[in-house]
Amino acid sequence: MAVVGAGPAGMATAFRLAQAGAAVTVYEATARVGGRARTDLVDGWRVDPACQLFGSVYTTFLRVLRAAGGGSLCVRTPGRDALWRRGKAHEVVYGSPASMLASGALPFGLKLRLAVYPPYLHRHAAALEPAALERAAAEGLDRESIAAWGVREPGRDFVDLLAAPTLAALYGTLPEEASAGFYHAVARQGMHAEVLALAGGASAFCDALAAALSRLGGRVLTGRRVRAVHPAKGGVELSGEGWTERFGAVVLAVPAPAAREIDGMTRPVVEWLEGVRVRPTVSLALLLDRPAGVRWFALSFARGESRALAAACVQENKLGDRVPPGRGLVVAYPLPEAGERLAAANADADTVLRALLPDLSRALPGIESAIRRVVLYHWPHAWTVFSPGYLARLGELRRTGLDFDGRIALAGDYLYMPNLEGAALSGVRAAERVCAALGLPTLPGD
């Protein structure tokens, strides 16, 4: 079997196929595994430039990691975040409704109106499972944006103080362009979740799976871009620059735009992939000569409270293994539209820093004088926008089977939910479908 892409979706696919007894080869276009779930070692700082934390409700992600022998890498974090509102950082504990209600982040009237939201999510629980979000479309939750739903139901403060900061910081999306069903699924996941991090950094997930894959006889080939995938007698043929290999089946575990560019995809699959909207962005790592000096890990902003910054993540407040003693590390993410503009302009580190520094300086006074080094990251396929109607399109994909024709399968977080759980889930599901089609054994519980 072949897997194209060594991010979380690809590595979950490869590991699951190897567990079933397949001989697996993973092709990765870049020099390393991880994709957006990577960790860079920079001058002694461990930088997680994209993925930061995950939740205890990420059941597939955790199951795969434990099966690969990486369960001990999961470490609970304090979950202490903050929302910037009216010129002040209001602390909250992520996953704790009680903390949100006690915090000054939300006005009293909104807190009263939110009393009906948990029961609403509970009533629709079966339709908000990440494994089957097409059910949300069947229940009518995918017809409008969360902005439209929020203004009509809890009110404008719900959109500006909850939906907008969450979507901008975690999903690179605006409330006006996010499906209400998608946001409800996000809210339900975070309602009572413990917040976890990976010891050693975000890359620990893919690194653990790569090591387990090697023990099972599989291999990962980096720096090998796949240009074409074509059916061949009894299987498929993969080719790149100066090479061609044949396999029994292949799973394309790359972002939708990258899958669309691979030659050999059928026209219906290409047309479906063309309907997947992916937003590019940038992120910025600031290596500091002192700690940031705050208690919270992640700060997001109420709508209108920042010009360009969506979130700032203080890495020394995540786990103690990220920065050298006495130093600090902040990873900054721009607002969705600002990030898209900066990415489209191929902005350099100085330009991005100038755009984000005014907002950073308000939240972290004196940070400019503490910056020792700036590292810029460009993400051309950063955020899949789950807009109104997208969950219905996922249902169409499942009904028609366009994501698997018996030999070529798709995997990626754009097929379930744009986070680590969605990536792992897509990889396991793709592997299971290949196993079933080719007569390989399935695992109990999958």
Image (spheres, rainbow, N blue to C red):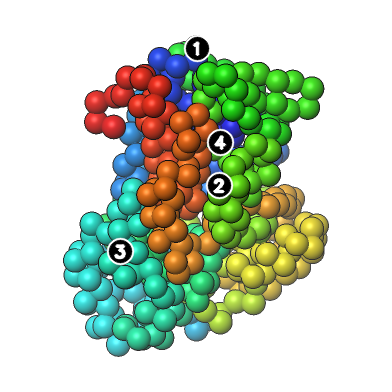
Q: Is residue 244 left or right of residue 213?
A: right
* Residue at mark 1: 217
- Circle 1 Cα neighbour tier, 10 Å, few/some/many (<14 / 14–19 / ≥20): few
Q: Residue at x 22, y 71 (%)?
A: 120
Residue 34 coordinates in the image, percent (x, y): 57, 36
Q: Mark 2 or mark 4: name the one nearer the start of the chain.
A: 4
Q: What residue did someone put label 3 on?
A: 138
Say which amino acid is labelled 4.
Answer: Leu
Which of the marked residues, 3 or 1, is nearer the chain's N terminus? 3
Q: Residue at x 68, y 44 (%)?
A: 261
**Image x and y of residue 19, in percent:** 39, 19
Task: Answer with mark 1 or mark 2, whichever residue precedes in sequence.
Answer: 1
Per the image, label 1 sits on a secondary structure element best described as loop
Q: CA distance from mark 4 to mark 1?
A: 20 Å
Measured in 3D between alpha carbons, the distance from the residue under mark 2 to the one under mark 4, in whole angstroms, is 12 Å
Specify which label sits upstream in the sequence, 4 or 3. Answer: 3
Q: Which residue is mark 2?
A: 269
Q: Amino acid at mark 2?
A: Val
Q: Quadrant of residue 247?
A: top right
The label on residue 47 is none
Residues at marks 4 and 1 touching, judged by CB atoms closer than 8 Å: no
Q: Position of residue 2 (x, y in %)?
A: 55, 24
Seen in the picture, residue 21 relative to 61 is either above or below; the reply is above
- Per the image, the residue denoted by label 4 is 252
Mark 3: amino acid: Ala
Side (left or right) of 299 relative to 351: left
Mark 1 or 2: the one toward you: 2
Please report the residue visible at 33 percent of the width from the left and 34 percent of the height from the top.
63
